[in-house]
Each structure stands twice: as C-alpha cells, then as structure tokens.
Amino acid sequence: MNLFRLMIWKEFMHIREDKFSIRLMIVEIVAQLLIMGYALTTEVKNTPIGIYDQSNTQSSRSLVASIRANNLFKYMGDYDNYDNLINAIEESKLSLALIIPSDFHKQIYSKNGCNIQLLVDGQDANSANVSSGYINAVVNRWKTAFISSQYNKNGTSLETIVPVSANMTILYNPLLKSTWFMVPALVVLLVTMVTSLLSGLSIVKEHEAGTLEQLLVTPISTFHILAGKTIPYFILGFVELCIFLLFAQLWFRIPFRGDFFTVALFGFIYMLSSIGIGILTSTLARTPQQVLLLIWFTLLFFMLLSGFFIPIENMPTWVQHVTIINPVRWFMLAVREIFLKGSTLSELWYEAVVMLITGVIVFGFSILFFHRRVQ
C-alpha cells in the first residue's frame, strides 16, 4: 500500500512540475468551455434576407413588416428586379430571397391561394434547411393572423371555421436554448481531452527522459508503475468533471436534474476508455508530438460519430452500427439525459453496460501493450 501511495504521489509531483499540463488542465480547458459553450450552437441567426415585392400592396407590405421585425433575419433591403436579387445571392450578400408576385393580394382571396417564391443559398445545407424553415414559419404565422383579422372584421372567428389546434408544451428545455444541449456534451469532450492526452503524454515524456527505464530496474513491478500512472488521472478526471458540471450550472445556468452519484459512476466507467486510449497511444508513439497527433485523430473520429454535431439517427445504418463501439457517444448521451431529464441508472443501464464492456477491452489492451513495451 505504501508503494502505491508513493507512486501516485510521485506522479502528482511530476504533474506539478509540468507547466504545460497544468496550463492545459486549467487555462486552455476553461477557455474552451467558455468560448465553445457560446460558439457551438444549432441555432441559425441573423440570416441575410432580401425581398422583391412586385405587389407593393397593403397585404404584401404587412408580410414584409413581419419578416423585418423578426430577429432571426437580417433584412438587407428591398430589391427592384429579379436579376439584382440573384446577383446578391451569387455575391453571398443574401442567404434568402423572397419574391412576392404582383397579384399577391388578389391570389390571397382566390380558392387556390398564393405561392411565394423563396430562393435559398444551399451551400450550407444545415443553415439552408433551418433558415428556410424559419421563414416558412414566419409566413404561416402571418397568414394565420391575416386571415383571422379578415374574418374578425365580418364578426366570425377563425377558430369556429378551423376548430382544431395544437397546444405545444416543450419539456426539459422549455426555452429551447441550444447551450442546454451542447454544453453537457462539451463537458464530455473536454474530460476526454484531459484524461487521454495527459496520461499519454506522461508515459511518453518519462520514456523520452529515461526515467521510465530507471523505474524498471528497481524492484517496482510493472503493475505498480501502471497504477501510479493511471490513478492520478482518474482523480484529475473526476476533479475536472466536477468543475465542468459546476461551470455548466453556475455560468450557463443549465439545470442539473439528476444525481451526482450517477454522473460519477458513468465518469469512472468512461475514464477506463479515455485513459486506456492515452496509455495505448503512448505505447505506439515515441515522442509527445506523435501522442498529440494520434490522440487528435482518435478523438476526431469519436467526436464526429458521437452525435455531438450530427444526430446518430441521421447517419447511414452501417455507420450507426460502428458508433456502438464509441464510448463518447454513450457518455455524451448519459450526461445529457442526467442533466436535462434527471435519468437514473435504471434508465441508463444499457449505456452503462456498453461503456463498461468497451472500457474493459480498451483498458485491457492498453495494459497488455504497455507491459510488452516495457519488457
């Protein structure tokens, strides 16, 4: 037991003397959480839009006014012909362009209704889909309000003509804040960076400095060396996880509806994989630069297949099967569910089992490769 404590204390002393590791754990990681917490969002705002109003009637001006009043769009002004509108899109001055036909007012009262042409810059497919959905929602809301006002003039209520309506109640994230969804996932990525990167760099730096070989000629076993190299990073990982959870609640005002025990359990299971990846890369790499590259490419793969940016359901079926071995996917899902829904272990047992199996395999292989390297 004394040997365990000495090895763990020795690793903490090594971390204290490593200014790069301390700066990475505190300054860079906190800065990334603050910046990316605000920057990474699924919302599409300030979309530049231009309108060619061929009708120029009271009804068309009412529609234009409702679009201009919406803060989701950045109104770039009126256009007097179709060519100028197209040129503005080609020059990336506009992302959306609305063309109101000359007989707009007349068509509103016709039995076939009126079609408004919407031109969308489709270079960014996600932004194009979201922004076009926004403009359709604005037009539909204006249409309902306009028709309702016309019926009210005649003493008739629109509800009596269309008696069915849907009352929407948004659960778990009633204000639809994207930070409530993105920041818990960002916490997972930052914990992964800290644990995998620092554990991998620690072993490679000791090997590069020759101190690892000095330990091997002592009576200390490989097991004690590996324990001394991993336990401190489990502790640091838990400390970082607690700091990130507090930041999410106090700074970003994200409600934490679950319990800390469940998060801590998932964190321990997950760090079997993240620290195992760090040890595994240290056995393949010879320099700290190689460790950085290997972990970066590994984490990039895990991040893109975790559901952080693209929902798993949107991926091809064979890719969805590949993501099953991705521990980041399951930990990210668990943290989001615990944060916003207050899910318990009884509801997340499947994620815990998959993470545990993956973690044991990855950590087991890392121990095996480390043992072979030091022999």
Image (tube, rainbow, N blue to C red):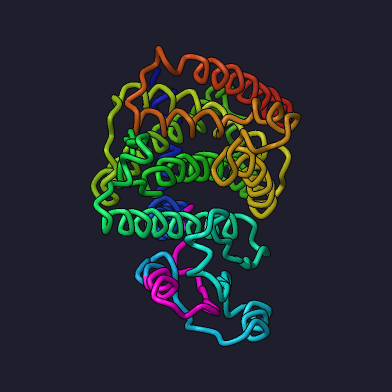
On the image, which quarter does residue 348 sit in?
A: top left
Would you place residue 351 above or below residue 313 in this image? above
Measuring 67% from the left and 43% from the top, which residue is drawn there?
301
Residue 157 versus residue 88: which sits nearer the camera? 157
Tell me where residue 240 appears, x and y as whole percent.
37, 41
Q: Which residues are magenta?
A: 42-65
Give x and y (percent) for residue 279: 61, 34
Report the side of 83 relative to 261 (left or right).
right
In this rendering, does residue 143 appear at all?
yes
Tell me if residue 20 can be seen: no
Q: Nearer the viewer, residue 298 or 86?
A: 86
> Residue 355, position in %: x, y?
55, 22
Residue pictured at 45% horizontal, 54% vertical: 140
Residue lying at 57% horizontally and 87% vertically, measured from the top left: 80
Which sits in the foreground, 204 or 193? 193
Q: Is residue 306 magenta?
A: no
Single out the residue that lies furthest toward the front: 154
Left or right, 200 with reference to 257: right
Q: Residue at x 55, y 34 (%)?
A: 328
The residue most toward the right is: 318
Q: Which sits in the foreground, 331 or 255?
A: 255
Quarter placement of the N terminus: top left
Instruction: Count every numbered label the image shows and give the total.
Output: 0
Q: Quadrant of residue 326?
A: top right
Residue 31: image location, x then y, percent: 39, 59
| The furthest residue to the top | 346
Relative to 172, is 308 above or below?
Answer: below
Is-magenta flag for residue 56? Answer: yes
Quadrant in which the C terminus is drawn? top right
